Image (spheres, rainbow, N blue to C red):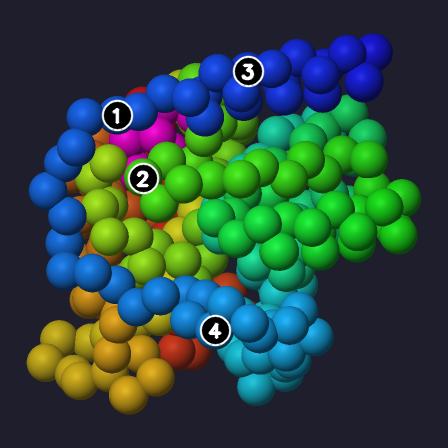
């Protein structure tokens, strides 16, 4: 039964990936999240899975703050090396599913290998696009976007695909770097467009419920917001 469900999802993904949404106005181009195309995966693991990176050191608390039940389906957008996909896999159980979405095929290959090495049959890697998360309508109960929202060049367009993929009543969680009013971000975060209040307002303008902040132990420079799809 599990294989049939996954096969049906993959077929739906093929259809979703073939769709193109109408072009919409983009914000200023964001920094490339993968600037060194020749960088090997070991280097990316060293960059992304290091204790000095807050969203890595606080990963267990962040994952625990996500309301997930056994059998839930969650999309991990900008999954990267699969840090959170692996944690969510434990939470949703064998009857659930984690869709690890990224625009970088090398990361998806790494996630597939990690899932296989750890016997995680409920993780499905999904190749996204800059304008779409490429998931079928109503396919997930929750969406998780960590350290990725500020890279979206056309937030309205890609968030319309997030909205569509979420079932009614589903939850959207956003974790990102905060910039206070009047503050100038440090050089390594100059690509972050704005802080928590403006992110909350922007995402709400796309049709999601007003944001509720989720307090997470270990988050100081970053924040977590929870939205709901009506």
Disc nearer the start of the sequence (1/4): 1
Disc nearer the start of the sequence (2/3): 3
Question: What residue sits right under mark 1 in the picture?
Answer: 21
Disc nearer the start of the sequence (2/4): 4
Q: What segment is highlighted magenta in the picture?
A: 158-165
Residue visible at 14% across and 36% down in the picture: 24
In this view, the residue in front, 143 or 128, is: 128
The reply to whether callout 2 and callout 1 are in contact (CB within 8 Å) is yes
Name the secondary structure under disc 1.
loop
The reply to whether callout 1 and callout 4 are in contact (CB within 8 Å) is no
Judged by depth in the image, the label closer to the viewer, 3 or 4, is: 4
Name the secondary structure under disc 2.
loop
Q: How many marks?
A: 4
Pinpoint residue 30: horizontal percent, then vertical percent: 25, 63
Name the secondary structure under disc 4.
loop
Judged by depth in the image, the label closer to the viewer, 1 or 4, is: 4
- When the figure is inspected, residue 169 is found, relative to residue 200, above or below; the finding is above
Q: Which mark is residue 131?
A: 2
Residue visible at 40% across and 58% down in the picture: 148
Magenta region includes residue 161? yes
Mark 3 and mark 4: span between their CA atoms?
32 Å
Local crowd size for mark 2, using a 10 Å CA cut-off: few (<14), some (14–19), many (≥20): many
Mark 2 and mark 1: span between their CA atoms?
8 Å
Judged by depth in the image, the label closer to the viewer, 2 or 4, is: 4
Q: Which mark is residue 36?
A: 4
Disc nearer the start of the sequence (3/1): 3
Question: What residue sits right under mark 3 in the picture?
Answer: 12
- When the figure is inspected, residue 56 is found, relative to residue 114, above or below; the finding is below
Mark 2 and mark 4: span between their CA atoms?
21 Å
Mark 1 and mark 4: span between their CA atoms?
29 Å
């Amino acid at each position: 039964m599990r294989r049939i469900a996954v096969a049906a999802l993959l077929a739906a993904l093929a259809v979703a990936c073939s769709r193109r949404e109408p072009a919409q106005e983009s914000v200023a181009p964001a920094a490339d999240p993968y600037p060194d195309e020749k960088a090997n995966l070991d280097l990316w693991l060293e960059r992304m899975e290091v204790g000095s990176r807050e969203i890595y050191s606080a990963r267990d608390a962040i994952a625990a703050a996500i309301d997930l039940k056994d059998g839930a389906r969650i999309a991990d957008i900008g999954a990267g090396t699969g840090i959170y996909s692996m944690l969510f896999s434990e939470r949703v159980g064998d009857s659930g599913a984690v869709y690890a979405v990224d625009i970088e095929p090398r990361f998806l290959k790494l996630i597939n290998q990690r899932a296989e090495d750890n016997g995680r049959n409920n993780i499905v890697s999904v190749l996204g696009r800059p304008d779409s998360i490429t998931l079928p309508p109503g396919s997930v109960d929750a969406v998780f976007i960590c350290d990725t929202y500020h890279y979206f060049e056309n937030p309205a367009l890609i968030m319309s695909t997030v909205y569509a993929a979420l079932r009614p009543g589903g939850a959207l969680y956003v974790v990102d770097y905060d910039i206070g009013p009047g503050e100038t971000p440090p050089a390594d975060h100059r690509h972050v467009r704005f802080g928590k209040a403006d992110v909350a307002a922007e995402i709400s303008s796309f049709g999601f419920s007003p944001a509720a902040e989720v307090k997470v132990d270990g988050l100081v420079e970053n924040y977590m917001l929870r939205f709901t799809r009506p």
